[in-house]
Structure formats: structure tokens, C-alpha cells
Amino acid sequence: MLKLLRKYSRSWFIALAVGAIVVVFVFWGIGGFKSGRFEEVARVNGAPILASTYQKQYEQVLKDYQERTQGEITEEIRKAKHFKDQALNYLIDEALVQQAAFRWGIGVTTAELQDHIRKMPYFQEDGHFSERRYLSSLARLRLSPGAFEEQERQRLVQQRVIQTVTSFAKVSDGELEEFFRLSREEVAVQYLAVSMEPFLARFNPPEADLKKYYEQHQNQFQMPERVKVRYLLFRPAAFVEQVKITPPELDDYLRKHAAELVRPTLIRVRELFLALPPKATPADRARLEKRAQELLLLSKKGVDFAALVQKHSQDAASRAKGGDLGEVKRGQKPPEWERVAFSLAEGEVDLAFTAKGLHLIKVEEVKETEKMPEAEARARATRELKEEKSRELARETARQAREELLGGNLAEVAKKFKVAPQETPLFAQTEAVAGLGMQRGFNDAAFRLKPQEVSRVVDLPQGYAVLQGLERQPVGPQPFDQVKERVRVAMGRPAARQEAEAEAARLLERLRKGETLTKVAAQAGLPLQDSGSFTRPQGFLNQPLAESLTSAAFQLSAQHPLPARPVFWKDKYYILAFKSRRAPTPEEFQKEAAKLREEFLKYKRQMLLDAWLTGERRRASIKIFELPS
């Protein structure tokens, strides 16, 4: 819960508040102590933070990082002290909030908790709380009512403490106008990017030097702990034929889900367009479709859609706006386009084919809906009911198989339940399993197992799995021959970065002396690129984490069109050159003022919360033990 309020704590806009409280972030180092039984990682005013709680939070921190960056969680990242500190600091803050609640007498009564849960839409049917839906939902999440209710009670208590701390935050008109200007101002730059890769590719030291580096840095080339498991996977699709939907069941489902059985009539969309060349051949179409599928895969992996549009779309008008087409009503576009677009939920992306070319469509918002035609509604309700019932059958069968596997042989259990036993190779906790992909639930369950031990039923997108441990391989050094290329790259990175920086500095100096961007780019063999207009929240190339580049771009102007030095980000040195700047208008401010005031108020509350937590830390007795490796 704290994370939701604090997720903006390191973003650019904290610097925008005029005269705001200066927040001092305290990142606690890892102490030299060890808890007596290695069960605790810290104590906050005497209250323990358990190693098991820390480990869960640490894995969540890594998952959040992976979702933000779309990168791989390497062993180097897992060992990074920053992420360990982040997980521990989160838990320390949580403990301080709970302790403040106790001191201030803040609590939640049973009646308040019950009222809160009864109002949760997820547990309602026909606008009323459903005990059946409540219990079945918790069963799917493998939570007991007692555990869930205690979790919600603690969450409500934390909310009340935070509301108390931040309740006196106020926003003045002057602050709001300045915040609006800084948050809506747009800048555009041209840029050259000097990559480390060419310099790294040329780095080829003698093998003896590589072996020496390897011996001196073996901790960088460790084989992570790996496990091997057998498993049974019960796929819902295998149970569909067993499902029979009666007319009363279908009618009841239609009645209870009437509010969901609607279809969009007005949507707000973005589009990436790839044009078919005149007189396109089948081979041309195949090549274009392959490219479109690659872009579709990137978008589904989380790559920013607007950035993909600006780089790849062939529709100049929408490309400048990140593919934003605005609002589209049914009947305005070709049928092939609408069949795809109006079938998507908010945030989904898919591919449509028209006579003009290929359209990657992303629905940003469903603005208006209408009741689904009866035939369409009945077909969808039948499909959803079958999917729901087949998943229930698969889950129940998996549960029965697990019970038998606890005292039986996996091959015999598999034969009885008519499911093929499967076995993984040795894999690390951050690696995908063939046939399943990267499934955190599966990997977590596998790494908890001892040889021959049986897991709980694991819920996966593909169905329900029951695992049995086979083998565990501890952390150990990888042979030099297997990591030789990694050693070369690690050894060469510092020199390659220095060479890339020197090359970028030389190009920037030529620009300072009056040479044109076009000439410098051409002679260096680098593409001259355009960022398009972006705001501070959007970030350079729609990358909010590229704060150094965004900050450098907004420091440029017509009077000072070049930065003081190249900017490093993601293995490249960027040379920026000012192109244009646009300030928001007073009319835009009036239109957005109310919404922006609430937005800015959240940021000021965040600052107050951070300041209060900093004070609580200074006053608290916080003892840090050794964190799990």
C-alpha cells in the first residue's frame, strides 16, 4: 500500500514544489550483526522484521524493476545493494507506520472492516455483497478469510496514519500555475547517439589476460543456484468437453453479468501504421506482416507504444503525436480495422489488416458502450461460463492429484489422471521454463522444494501445476570456457565507455565550432535523429526513467542550443541539440486546473509523508542484521 503512495518519490516533479519541505532519504547500510537464529533481518524499536517477509518484499522489488525496465534480472542485479536496501527500507517504513498507529490509538473496528469488504466490487453480485463469491475468490487466491481480513485491517490502519500525516497539505494558486507550466511545457531536440558497442567489439585481449581477469573476478561469473523438478499440468482446455451449460445457468449468468456484457461504441486509440507498397507482391506483404508481428510482440512485452510509433509508423500526421488518433466511433473506420479495435479492452494491442496496410492498434480508453446484441451476449456468456467451469474442474483435478502424489508415484498418478508427466532441465530462479515461459509462481514453488517433496497446486496462465522436487544444484563458479565472452565484455566495458565518451566529446566540440549537425552526423556515420516533442513526465523518447536526458533537454534553448557535455544512458552517449520549445497556454491551464490541483496535492502529500518518515527514522531504534544473500 505504501508503494502506491510513494511510487513517485524519485520522479522529476518532486523538484517542482516551490518552498517545499526538503526530504532527506536515509538508505540504511547493511550492518555487521547477525540475528541469533538468522530469522530476523532487522528490528524497528524492538519489533522484528522476519527474513521470510524481507525475501518476499525483495522479490517484489525485483519484479517491479523488471516491469519498469523490461530487462532481465541478472545475478549482478540480484546482488546489487540498492535493491536490498530498497526492500528493507520499505519494510522499515511499514513498521514505523504501524507503530505510529498504536501510539496514536488509530485502529479499525470489526464493523468498519466488514463494511469496507462488503463494498469491494470484486465480491459483489447484482450490486450486493455475495458471501459465495467472497469465499470462492479467496479460495482461488489461496487465502483464508482470516488472513485476508487481517491484511485488509492493516492496510486500512496504514491508510489512516498516512491521511493523518498528510491531511494539512495545501496547494496555492502560484504553486499550481508553476507546476502546470513545468509539467506541460514541451521541448524537442535532435540528437546523435554514440554507442559503446563498436568499441567493445574491437576489444580482443590475449586469452591469458582474460583468464587473469576471470580469476580475479570469479564472483561475477557464478552459476546461480538451479533446480530440476517434475510436474503435472492440468490445462482447462482438456476439461471443456466435460462442461455442460444448462439454459437456467446461462440465463442466470446473463442476468448477473448484464453490466459487463457491453461493447464499445466510442474509443480513444493510438495506431502504428505500416503502409503496403504500390502493387505489393505476396512476398512484400509477408515481409511487412513479419515486421508488424515483431512490433506487436515488443508492445506486448511492455515497450512504450508511443515510442514505437514515433520510430516506426509511416503515418506522419499521427506519428508526431505518438500515434494518438483521438476518439473513434463505430462506423468511422474500415470494417477490418473496427473488428479488431472494438474487440480490445483498455490497454490491449492487436493487429488489423486493411487495403492500405497494417495497423497496430492500442485502445487507450473505452469512452462509451452499448448493450451487446442478444446473440453476441449469449455466445460470450457461454464461452466465459465454459472457461470458468473448465478451470474449476482443472483446479479440482490438480488438487486430487496432489493428494495422491503425497503418498504415491508421480508416473502412476499421471497415468491415473491421464496427464503427461513433464520434467524441467536445471534452471535458475530468474529463468523461463520451456513450454511455460517465465512464471514466477512456478519458479518460486520449485525453489521451495526439497528432492521428492510435493508442492501445493500452482496457478498458472496455462492451468494448474503440481510439482515434485528432483535435484538442487548450489551456487558455484562457471568454467572459464563457458563464460569467456562474458569475461571479455566485462573486462572491456570500462575502456569502451571511455572511448565512446571521448568520441562523443569530439563530435560535440565540432558542433560548438559551428559545423552543422548534418555534416557531423554524416562524417561520423551516425543517424541524425529527432526526439519529437515531449514533456518532463513523458521523458526523452517516452522513457520516464531517462531522467538525465530529459533534464539535459529542458536546459537547452535557442540561445544555448548545445549541452555542456554528452549525456550517458543505457550504454550510449547522447549529443543533444535544441530544436523547439512550447509553453502551455493560459486556456490550457484553466481547462486542466481542477484535475491538476488534485494531482499536485498528491505530490505534496507524498513529500510530507517522506519528511515524516525521515523524522521517525531519526528517532527510532533501528538495528540491521545480515540480509539473506
Image (tube, rainbow, N blue to C red):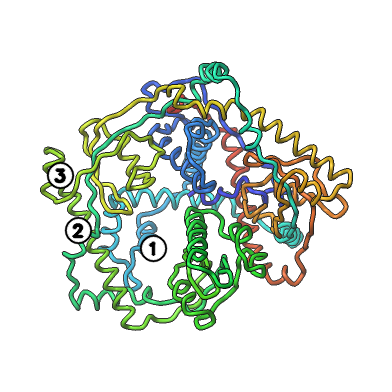
Q: For mark 3, does the 10 Å Cα neighbourhood hold few (<14), some (14 to 19), or many (20 or more) residues?
A: some
* Label 2 to label 1: alpha-carbon separation: 27 Å
Q: Give the left or right position of residue 272, taking residue 336 as reference.
A: right
Tell me which amino acid carries mark 1: Met
Residue for badge 1: 120
Q: Residue at image x 49%, y 52%?
A: 159
- 433 or 32: nearer the eye? 433
Q: Position of residue 243 (x, y in %)?
A: 18, 66
Dot label at residue 236: none
Residue for badge 3: 403
Q: Is residue 307 visible?
A: yes
Tag in front: 1 or 3? 3
Q: Residue at image x 60%, y 34%?
A: 26
Tell me which amino acid carries mark 3: Glu
Q: Quadrant of the C terminus?
A: top left
Counting residues from the N terminus, which is met first, the one under dot 2 or under dot 1? 1
Q: Give the left or right position of residue 263, taking residue 128 as reference.
A: right
* Label 2 to label 3: alpha-carbon separation: 16 Å
Tell me which amino acid carries mark 2: Leu
Residue for badge 2: 393
Q: Residue at image x 70%, y 55%?
A: 531
